Amino acid sequence: MKITMINGSPKAKNSASESLLSILKGYCNLAAPDLVLNKMVIEEENMAEIWKSDALVIAFPLYIDSVPSHLLRCLIQIEEYARLHGQERTSEETIKVYVVINNGFFQGKQNMPAIEVMQHWTKRCGFEFGQAVGVGGGGMINFIKNVPDGHGPKKNLTLALREMAGNILQKKSGETKVFELNYPAWAYKWQAEYGWRMAARKNGLKSKDLNKRA
Ligand SMILES: Cc1cc2nc3c(=O)[nH]c(=O)nc-3n(C[C@H](O)[C@H](O)[C@H](O)COP(=O)(O)O)c2cc1C
């Protein structure tokens, strides 16, 4: 079975989406090639890889409650390709779509509208929806890389991604899971604000400049 894991974050490196895919790859026990969609157009050879897949796992960050605009363009390109080539695949060969979204706010349920967008897109392509995971507190994901699976802030994440990995490997569908990391909301907010103050200082600004209105 060919599983293609797609990182839809526009970041060149160190994205939370990349970390989530790497955890999922570990659980799937495969060295699936990563496809990075951080531009507005999918190159021909990458489209061919996507089209040959049995399952697509698409990870991306939530942007303005939805899909980042470059990725939206890529999704439209896949949809057009599917419309032209759909008859080449039988209904048993349909591509199963799994989605992993992370967002900066604490609450994972913020990802619901984007999950619905992905469900509609899947249908329009003639693919089949497998499962969606929406995780809040995305700003923390790269900081908990070394926490053992299933422990501390990783409890919910491990459960959800392990379940999804099982479903991917069996090409099964599963329930949508939206959740938070196991961490206090106040501490997450405090750390985010501290990080912004540090970033402002690094860029020659004062903390109070963060409150300025344009
Ligand atoms: C342009 C932009 C829009 C965003 N919109 C939202 C949003 O609507 N809700 C939210 O919770 N986080 C939002 N975020 C935060 C990202 O979802 C968050 O930083 C995420 O962890 C980035 O994931 P990545 O590292 O995989 O790119 C936004 C970030 C940017 C840059």
Image: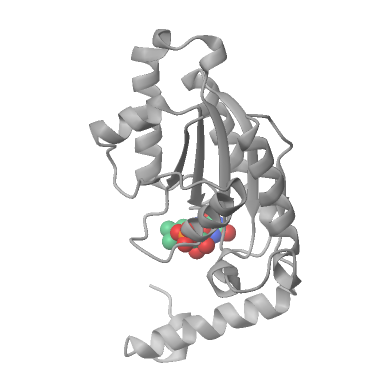
Q: Nearer the viewer, residue 25 or 50?
A: 25
Where is residue 83? Give x, y as percent.
39, 15
Q: Place residue 198 in its image quadrant.
A: bottom left
Among the 4 quarters of the image, the one containing residue 108? bottom right
Q: Is residue 190 left or right of residue 125?
A: right
Residue 78 appears at what percent x and percent y? 38, 28
Identify which residue is drawn at 26% across, 33% down.
45
Relative to 56, residue 194 above or below? below
- The quadrant the C terminus occupies is bottom left
Nearest the eye: 138 or 46: 46
**Rendering colour mode:** one colour
Q: Which residue sits at x=33%, y=61%?
A: 12
**Place of residue 142 in the rendered image (x, y in percent of width and height, measured from the top left):** 53, 70
Residue located 39% across and 43% down the image: 71
174 lies left or right of 2: right
| Whether residue 132 is situated above or below residue 135 in the rendered picture | above
Question: x%, y% of residue 124?
Answer: 50, 20
Say left or right for 149 vs 120: right
Looking at the picture, tell me which residue is in the foreground, 23 or 15: 23
Q: Residue at x 74, y 59 (%)?
A: 156
- Tell me where residue 49 sits by quadrant: top left
Task: Tell me how many marks there are.
Answer: 0
